[in-house]
Amino acid sequence: MTFSNEATISREQQFAAAHGENEATALSRILEPHSVAVIGASSNPDKRGFQIIKALKKGGYAYPIYPVNPRTGTILDVPVVTEIAALPRDVDIAIIVRPAEEVPEILIQCGERGVAGAVVLAHGFRERGDNGSAAEERLRDALARSGVRIIGPNTSGMLNCTVGADFIGLPELPPSGPVSALTQSGNMVLSLVEDRRAINGPGFDVIAGLGNQTDVGYAELIEELCLRETTRSIAIYNEGFLNGRAFLDAASRVVQSCPIVMLRGGRSSEGQKAALSHTGSIAGADDVALKTLAQMGVSLVERSDELLPVAALMATTPLPKPGTGVVVLTDGGGHATLAVDALSRSGVPFASLSESTKIRLRSVLGGQASVLNPIDVASAADAYPDVFPECIEILASDPEVGLVVINGLFGAYHVRFDSSLLAAENSAAERIVSLQQVTGLPLVFHSCYANRKPENHDILRQGGIQVFPSIDWAVAGCKALFERADWLARQGLDGREIVVDAASVAVPGGLSAETTARGILQKLGVGTGEWVPASDAESVETAVARFAAACAVKVDTACVVHKSDVGCVRLGVKREAARAAARGIESAMAFAAPKASFGFIVAPMVKSGVELFVGATNDPVFGPVILFGSGGVLVEAAGDVTFRAAPFSPDEALDMINETRVAKILDGFRNYPKVDKGLLANFISKVSHAVMSMENLSELDINPIIANESGIYPVDVRLVGK
Amino acid sequence: MTFSNEATISREQQFAAAHGENEATALSRILEPHSVAVIGASSNPDKRGFQIIKALKKGGYAYPIYPVNPRTGTILDVPVVTEIAALPRDVDIAIIVRPAEEVPEILIQCGERGVAGAVVLAHGFRERGDNGSAAEERLRDALARSGVRIIGPNTSGMLNCTVGADFIGLPELPPSGPVSALTQSGNMVLSLVEDRRAINGPGFDVIAGLGNQTDVGYAELIEELCLRETTRSIAIYNEGFLNGRAFLDAASRVVQSCPIVMLRGGRSSEGQKAALSHTGSIAGADDVALKTLAQMGVSLVERSDELLPVAALMATTPLPKPGTGVVVLTDGGGHATLAVDALSRSGVPFASLSESTKIRLRSVLGGQASVLNPIDVASAADAYPDVFPECIEILASDPEVGLVVINGLFGAYHVRFDSSLLAAENSAAERIVSLQQVTGLPLVFHSCYANRKPENHDILRQGGIQVFPSIDWAVAGCKALFERADWLARQGLDGREIVVDAASVAVPGGLSAETTARGILQKLGVGTGEWVPASDAESVETAVARFAAACAVKVDTACVVHKSDVGCVRLGVKREAARAAARGIESAMAFAAPKASFGFIVAPMVKSGVELFVGATNDPVFGPVILFGSGGVLVEAAGDVTFRAAPFSPDEALDMINETRVAKILDGFRNYPKVDKGLLANFISKVSHAVMSMENLSELDINPIIANESGIYPVDVRLVGK
């Protein structure tokens, strides 16, 4: 795992570590092809095989195009090549517009001509359900034989705005710029393009529809995009992963240098069904996905209309410095109130302004102005737009201020009040651009007039500052910036990483006896407290006597899941009652599981405390995942649980703890004991490392764990192997 | 309270019940003035007193305008009146642009000339904090003496697009239409106007900035707007209420015929501070506000950019029939997945299509098409836009289908694919408009091309169908429509309304002894189970003996809040231990509260069950409010609580129960007993009626209530009077 304490490394180093030389070349050639063959080119304007050539010409694509069609001639003045075998060697990319059944043979022919990669548009493969799996099999076969790398099948295509390569056939090519995008939906490509257009946002580098990911998938694509100097953020519309773990690994490397903004589809059960019929992929448990993706530094957005604005902001805006907060600079109380509410809801920290900052702000805004946070310039800006750059300049020198949200009517005083302000507003915008460039202070604008696209907004945008018509988009972007800054700051800072250097342990199939489960945990560095196994009533008595305290006596067997439900647990057992307790359990077992072999496990009673739960599962999408939350019998009903991909540090575990509701009780609520959260975090982190060394793990439940002022006591341990 | 089982009554009846004749006239004349005096008119184009006259002329205001200014002449060709005394009698409205200190005298002069109402723009009143309260006092005085009704002070103004009266001075008057708006922020007026412009939505009737609400406030305004035939929905940006209870009462009447869509500001503690400095009002506890407003049928939106789209939709779109669900009709899997996710997250029910509907859909879409929900027309629409009206027509005949969300590229096939489709798309839109009109089936559109404003989208809009560029806006609107339909359907259906016809009871000041508290509850119809008071150890023993069961013996006093914390509770007391228990409590009291007079309360022990909590507070904004949730010592840490304004029916109480996490346990989780939710709902509803008859109630806590298979047992009752 790489998401622990590595220093940030260069994009090239990252890539070199991830790929061999040849593959790198193939994928980089696909994403920025310098020659294109269109397999299935057509002279019929209604056909995709015509539209792609038309789009390439229209987009200003400056490299060779080879229409492949058995009939000779030209298409849009481009000479046709009659067969793949007649292509020049080593074409970068083939766009295959022929139907599913022809694709395998085409790929093999392409391989023979040294074509590096292909985009396969055809559908009729895995996404069809069982009907398509044979076609998918033939496709895989052809991939293995030909060596051609493909995007798709069942993709809407791909575009590279930097070289003008549009294989989607858009009405017009979007401007080139720093945002790249990966989607599992052709319609979402169109949404991203239209959403950018609506906000006059920065342009695109590469946009690719992943389709079935039969060959190239998310993990490889983000690593390749991260290598591109022209990509500054990656927007993803994701409907699930074929290999979520590979994505988590790749993402944790990529986000070191390139932000990833993700919108997830198929989060609800109804949505999962829709996504499944659409791309044949499964989104996975939503909670697990959200928590593990955030853990790896992926910026998640909730709403579909936020994906493009946030990715645009991340691509162009500097990050706030760690430990700083946001300031809202406004010309209207209502807008400021809404921005502050939304920032607060998003967990963005607020800056407290220093006294000297306040004094300086008052000298600009007048003695009556509100110079708390939000800062309200009120009507000061109506006739004098430079009040904004003046305030920003003051804020930039306050070390508490990490980012300024400017909100209200900005840039439209010439619309709202007096058209003669146009020039002054343009020059204020220019001053603001140079302030962000000189000071590095990130600036985010909301203006309710943004949809009118006044000149000065475009001045800001050309200077790398985004202006949004929606307060909520601006705030979603601020949240992503602060979270990313925080995430990056934590990389390499964590001195408490636990390294468990244990050889791996095979978990027996099915349910383990509790002593086996505890033994495995202890071997892997996870303390399970005081307990001893006992074989019979006599040794139970000996064990209780040795502890010299009231004990819990439980059956130890692989044959009973809920021990107390079948009368196989005795609590508060003293020496004099120990034999009777063991005999009682023996009788209960004779009834509950007459043929089971069993022993006993004896442990001193634990003082009462807060009941917690630590668990692990082998998630089908994201691999080993740790659960933490409120424990006890109500664990499911309480629904107070959070997730992380294993392994992780105690710091990450502390975050988990603080995300749960039970965290409030751990600080010593009413009569409850105060629990050492650091100790607890250490325990959770140790479990997260231990499960990485367990082979064939299916499920681990440590529930309840009793936490009190003296420690962390696992009371019941249940381990299940595959 | 009117939010129980009244039949829907006409707007006129509602108004007649709420107002006397004269007041009605004054406020209706303010909102639609047929003559305007501008007090402080100016010939200086930079002054508001000029801009208002200019805006009236530009907006086509067709009624008399009277600029009032000591200097004679004309302003924009309108003859100036040199003093208020020279105005004609009974002018509808005066716009007062003079500073705060002059306002009271101006109002008195206006009153003398029979001016009905005024808009007071000046600030410098209550919103200034203590500095402004004297000015506010003088203003109130002038209001009382003059009889003039005012909107403001500290308001950005008001506009009536229907008559072209713009007292705000916008760059251009928005088109007139069915949406009215009330806001506590001038900037939010501008946002609403710009947001409408961005989506080409329906126009406005009245927009008013409420300002300090020194006279006319929310409650009166919504009732008056509801009377206007030209208003079909009311959008509100609210930063808190001076009298939340009056708003709840008015809203529950208004929403019977006119939807109210509300965005709340000042929800976070940071936002509350911002709002307070802005309008001097307090938003109140967010949870209480959200729950009580929803209870009265107010449609709440979460994000500022949703207010206008949802209000536009509510003003123009028919309601789904109760008990129906939504269908998503799409041309792209990604968009459909996102719409389905968002609908699911919003709790909108999905329709199951009948077999005959599916067969008919397949006959249009082909045998391979996905005719589940979402219905994916896939590429069927690329060349044949009429596939949409054909599917909608089929869906309209399925009684399960309550609303159709059409999402994807709708209306832009001529942009995306083939410009020759323009005419076919326009005619499809026309067919769709007539389908909504004929069948009454509500339709909501998302198109990622909506920002391009294709002709056919405007055909839809002119036919009363909204088209949004954001899936999330469309979904927020669907949520509001379904919730409103559900709310209306429940009015009058509730046969289980509890009427407590008790005379009111005065709650003693401070903490009551528990027997007093229980006595008051019982008198008001709330059973508190078996218990008896006892005066001394002997009568405690008698009581325990009479119950013939183990009992709880507790001190009964007004001097101890947490009885068990000071050793004044004994549990599981049998007859033989009863005297000792009482004596033990006596000793504990001698230590804890030596001078307190006290007795005992004896009740049989309750079998274990689920611990619940029912409480009541007298909310400073919303009046008597009932709380329900998980009980026990962890009640605060669990945070599992919901709210309603008292009184309410058992049906409403059942909704409360089902909103909490503990509801899952009530159905019989693991070893927990199954609880009769109907019985519990009845109990909560009874408490909600009882508190309405308590004078001077400050707080009521019934915690824990033990609920098990045999009943509902209030264990501890704590009542506090003012």
Image: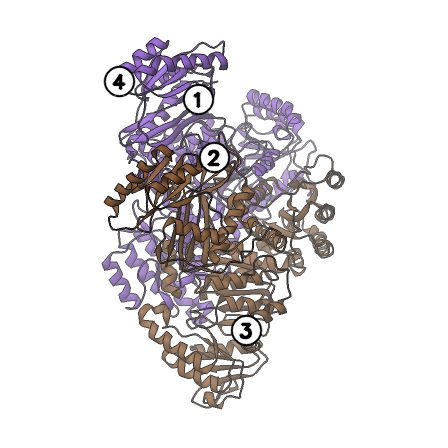
Chain colours: A brown, B purple
- In front here: A85 or B570? B570
Question: Which of the image's four quarters has the N terminus of chain B?
Answer: top left
* Residue mark closest to the camera, 3 vs 2: 2
Q: What mark, if any, has residue A31 been given in the picture? A: 3
* Residue mark closest to the camera, 2 vs 1: 1
Same chain for mark 2 and mark 1? The answer is yes
The residue carrying mark 4 is: B548
Q: Spatial distance from mark 4 to mark 1, Cα to Cα? A: 24 Å
Is residue B200 something one can see in this rendering?
no
* Residue mark closest to the camera, 3 vs 4: 4
Q: Position of residue A471 (x, y in %)?
A: 56, 48
How crowded is the residue under tag 1: few (<14 C-alpha within 10 Å), some, or many (20+)?
few
Is residue A306 something one can see in this rendering?
yes
As drawn, B479 above or below B353: above
* Residue mark closest to the camera, 2 vs 4: 4
Q: Spatial distance from mark 3 to mark 4, Cα to Cα? A: 84 Å
> What chain is tagged by disc 1?
B
Q: Spatial distance from mark 2 to mark 4, Cα to Cα? A: 37 Å
How crowded is the residue under tag 3: few (<14 C-alpha within 10 Å), some, or many (20+)?
many
Q: Are marks 3 and 2 in contact (CB under 8 Å)?
A: no
The residue carrying mark 1 is: B564
Query: Going by the image, does B339 lie left or right of A473?
Result: left
> What chain is tagged by disc 2?
B
